[in-house]
Amino acid sequence: MIHKRRNVRIRLSRTIIFVLVISLMLASFTVYLDYRLRTVVKAFAKSAVKTVVTDCANRASYKVLNELEVDYSSLAKISRNEEGLATTVEIDSSTANKVKSYISNEISNMLASYEDVTFSVPLFAAFGIYYTTLKWPKLDYTVHITTTVVSNFKSNFQSAGINQVLHQILLEVGLESDVAVLGGNTEQFTTTSFIVAETVIVGAVPDAFTSVGHATDEIMEDIFDFGASK
């Protein structure tokens, strides 16, 4: 009887030790997995947020430009000399700032419906494994974002052939997002640009270009002359 009780105590002790070892291993693995996932989740979160804000910027710009029916003649004026050659290109600051303001507001309105962004992370990605066959199981995450929109007009001149210059008026949009993600907040800065209007200028390259791409709504006199010849 005493021998049997001793065997029971030994088996019980071994079982307890086994359970403690397994629990310790599971706890260590959980801590390690959490550490690995924090880095991976941040990378996936930034990618998901970039996709959302870029899509909103593109859709907002397309919508506003169609509604305002913006074209090159409404944004820019080309001055020509007596021979009919282009000498200067001047951007209409009032129209440019109106377009910029409308697009920025529309982007902000669209992003308001994306305060929470949901995405999935393959569990094996925590260990640097991205093979197609190992993309399951997946962990679902939701991050909260707030985004600030900053936009400026840019101009681009390209040769379009003999005595022809393609002038493109682009709007560059900067989207600075604050992402609340696992392990704390992180920042994501995304830039995208699109063509607002363009035209082919026949003749010599303009001697001067007046841009108000950096003008704010309050400061309309922020004008720069590039390469103007007297």
Image (tube, rainbow, N blue to C red):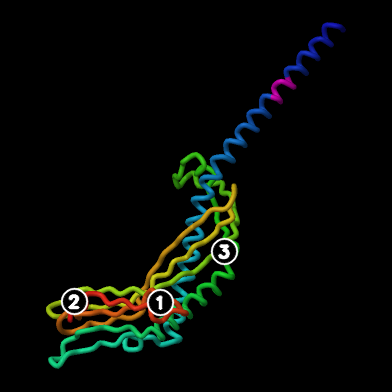
- Under mark 3, the amino acid is Thr
Local crowd size for mark 2, using a 10 Å CA cut-off: few (<14), some (14–19), many (≥20):
few
Which is more foreground, mark 2 or mark 1? 1
Is residue 134 or residue 62 the one in the foreground? 62
Which is more foreground, mark 2 or mark 3? 3
Question: What residue would you read off at disc 3?
Answer: 146
Q: CA distance from mark 2 to mark 3?
A: 41 Å
Is residue 100 or residue 45 the one in the foreground? 100
- Residue 92 percent coordinates (x, y): 36, 85
Q: Quadrant of residue 4?
A: top right
Local crowd size for mark 1, using a 10 Å CA cut-off: few (<14), some (14–19), many (≥20):
some
Question: What residue would you read off at disc 1?
Answer: 215
Q: Main secondary structure of the magenta part?
A: helix
Q: Quadrant of the C terminus?
A: bottom left
The residue range painted magenta reads: 15-20
Rendered view: 163 above or below 23: below
Residue farthest to the front, as pictured: 230
Question: What residue would you read off at disc 2?
Answer: 160
What residue appears at the point 84 percent right and 11 percent down from the top-left corner?
5
